[in-house]
Image (spheres, grey):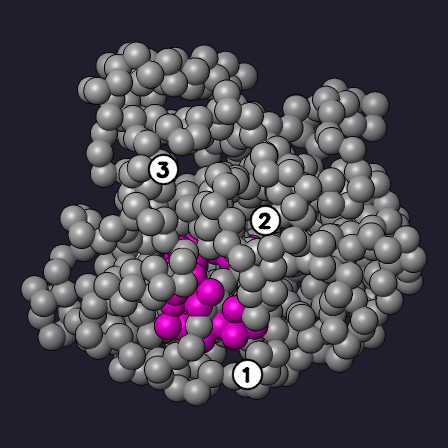
């Protein structure tokens, strides 16, 4: 395997960003760290870095809902994630962007999506962005990646060109999880760009592949083959589960059979109760009065209920399967003596997705699918999970993926490391994906990022480190006057805690109406205060407009 850039060494920090959940009433779930039904790789990798700094593994789940993990209140079995979360600090107010590519831009750049250059689905990051792996590698980290890239489709914009020493990447926003790629060719290529790249070169999918297994295998392989003795590494495991299409290996297909026959309205109520019991939901967050867009479960025909129940069964199996593969990665770290020296962050990349079951994006060229009830979840099917189940995972927070209301941006997350102070606790400070880059740098003993990198001018990092917060050194991340702008192609928002303004249509249009919410008193964003506080609304929306006009013009 060709390595595009030379390996260097220094400390590392493990960020585990995945999805998972708690005890299941359905089929028996594998124990924490279990290897069945898919085998784990044997361990053989370097020992802990000689200078004692941690390794970094960042694992990202795709479209995982807020309560789709056991440590946030789910019934889905995710014992590996639950154990890690309870050994670390659960981040209950952690925000991504509202869509996949934009969240990855925040993560890799430490700044907003437009400032990073990512406005539409396949945009690459700007040349004047010093990415997270580039910064870590310059400090001596070895850098490895497996999974979804979604930050530009050309090889010159891929992970091999943006700081990763070894990488296997799905370049586009999504694909099948098993069977054959939805994109034509071998290796699959679409509109002149390869769908998969390994170390910057076209890559083929192996026979019998499944996405979560393949990406975990690749990351473990890179750590076994390329990681150097005594040097730290940064690993990025960007899983595509449980993003549509809902698909799982055959021996997982019936794992949750019958579990969701009561419907999404009942699940929404049980998730709310369990998350409240765990202390995840804010004291001012109530389910009463929640209004989603899904039809009431009891209004559906028996046939439609059966189809929707099956979609959630497959979705839950995808999440548990992902947790099992996280367990494989953790078992590898334990067996190779690296686990205790690894910092772990887990997060989803945005809020739960609300596409209808028969959704197929226009970018998918294949039409030879069989999404019948009998084939749902198997190779050749192409279904989403539907808004009802996504709202059950998001309520009482408002809206879903694509929105800048909390339901579109609030994600399950935790950080685990021996230096975390309140292990087993819950942190409610407002944190964002932009904050990950400076946090990782500080946790590795590196200085705060500036506006120059390796002799060139780069975009400033807007995020703030929360390392001092999680280690008990400070209680602050932002000052009282600091604001966090959010920008999407047709939406805008700005948070100056605890106040938030939101424009749910073109925020640059002078006629657009801005809403105002108090996130401390009203975390569900039910009561618009703009009429009561017009001056504050004008002040905060004015701050956004100043930022938005500049970012849109660049």
- Nearer to us of marks 3 and 2 is 3
From which residue to which does the magenta span run? Answer: 58-82
Q: Which residue position holds label 1?
A: 31
Which of the numbered marks, if any, corresponds to residue 520?
3
Q: Earlier in the sequence, mark 3 or mark 1?
A: 1
Residue 272 picture location, percent across and down: 29, 60
Report the Cα–Cα distance between label 3 and label 1: 38 Å
The answer to whether 228 appears left or right of 475 in the picture is right
Element class at badge 2 = loop
Secondary structure beneath dot 1 equals: loop
Structural crowding at the residue carrying mark 1, measured as other residues with C-alpha within 10 Å and reported as few (<14), some (14–19) or many (≥20) = some
At x 57%, y 56%, the residue is 89
Q: Position of residue 368 (x, y in %)?
A: 35, 65
Location of residue 328 by image quarter: bottom right
Closer to viewer: mark 3 or mark 1: 3
- Residue 293 appearing in the image: no
Is residue 391 found inside the magenta-colored segment of the image? no
The residue indicated by pointer 2 is 149
């Amino acid at each position: 395997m060709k390595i595009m850039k030379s390996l260097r060494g220094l400390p590392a920090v493990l960020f585990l960003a995945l999805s998972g959940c708690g005890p299941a009433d359905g089929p028996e779930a594998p124990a924490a760290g279990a290897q069945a039904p898919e085998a784990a790789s044997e361990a053989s990798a370097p020992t802990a870095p000689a200078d004692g700094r941690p390794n970094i593994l960042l694992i990202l789940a795709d479209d995982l809902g807020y309560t789709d993990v056991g440590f946030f209140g789910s019934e889905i079995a995710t014992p590996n994630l639950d154990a890690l979360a309870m050994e670390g600090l659960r981040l209950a107010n952690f925000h991504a962007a509202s869509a996949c590519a934009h969240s990855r831009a925040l993560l890799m750049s430490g700044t907003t999506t437009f400032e990073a250059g990512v406005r539409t689905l396949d945009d690459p990051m700007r040349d004047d962005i010093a990415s997270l792996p580039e910064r870590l590698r310059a400090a001596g980290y070895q850098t490895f990646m497996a999974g979804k890239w979604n930050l530009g489709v050309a090889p010159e914009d891929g992970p091999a060109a943006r700081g990763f020493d070894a990488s296997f990447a799905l370049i586009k926003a999504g694909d099948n999880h098993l069977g054959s790629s939805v994109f034509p060719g071998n290796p699959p290529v679409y509109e002149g760009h390869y769908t998969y790249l390994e170390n910057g070169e076209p890559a083929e999918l192996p026979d019998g592949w499944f996405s979560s297994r393949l990406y975990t295998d690749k990351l473990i392989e890179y750590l076994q083959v390329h990681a150097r003795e005594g040097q730290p590494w940064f690993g990025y495991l960007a899983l595509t589960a449980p993003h549509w299409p809902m698909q799982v290996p055959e021996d997982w297909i019936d794992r949750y059979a019958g579990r969701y026959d009561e419907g999404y309205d009942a699940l929404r109520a049980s998730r709310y109760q369990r998350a409240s019991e765990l202390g995840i939901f804010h004291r001012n967050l109530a389910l009463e009065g929640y209004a989603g867009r899904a039809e009431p479960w009891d209004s559906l025909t028996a046939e439609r209920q059966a189809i929707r129940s099956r979609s959630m069964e497959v979705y839950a199996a995808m999440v548990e399967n992902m947790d099992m593969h996280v367990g494989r990665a953790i078992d590898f770290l334990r067996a190779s003596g690296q686990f205790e020296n690894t910092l772990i962050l887990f997060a989803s990349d945005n809020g739960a997705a609300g596409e209808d079951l028969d959704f197929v994006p226009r970018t998918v060229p294949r039409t030879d699918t069989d999404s019948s009830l009998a084939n749902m979840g198997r190779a050749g099917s192409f279904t989403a999970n539907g808004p009802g189940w996504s709202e059950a995972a998001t309520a009482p927070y408002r809206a879903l993926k694509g929105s800048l209301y909390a339901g579109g941006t609030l994600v399950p997350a935790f950080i685990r490391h021996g230096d975390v102070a309140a292990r087993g606790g819950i942190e409610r400070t407002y944190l964002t994906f932009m904050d990950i880059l400076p946090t990782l740098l500080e946790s590795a003993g590196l200085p705060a990022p500036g506006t120059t990198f390796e002799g060139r001018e780069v975009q400033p990092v807007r995020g703030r480190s929360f390392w001092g917060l999680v280690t008990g050194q400070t209680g602050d991340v932002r000052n009282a006057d600091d604001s966090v702008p959010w920008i999407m192609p047709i939406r805008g928002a700005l948070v100056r805690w605890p106040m938030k303004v939101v424009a749910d249509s073109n925020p640059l249009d002078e006629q657009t109406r801005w809403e105002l919410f108090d996130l401390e008193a009203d975390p569900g964003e039910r009561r618009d205060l703009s009429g009561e506080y017009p001056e504050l609304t004008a002040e905060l929306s004015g701050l956004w407009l100043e930022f938005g006009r500049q970012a849109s013009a660049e």
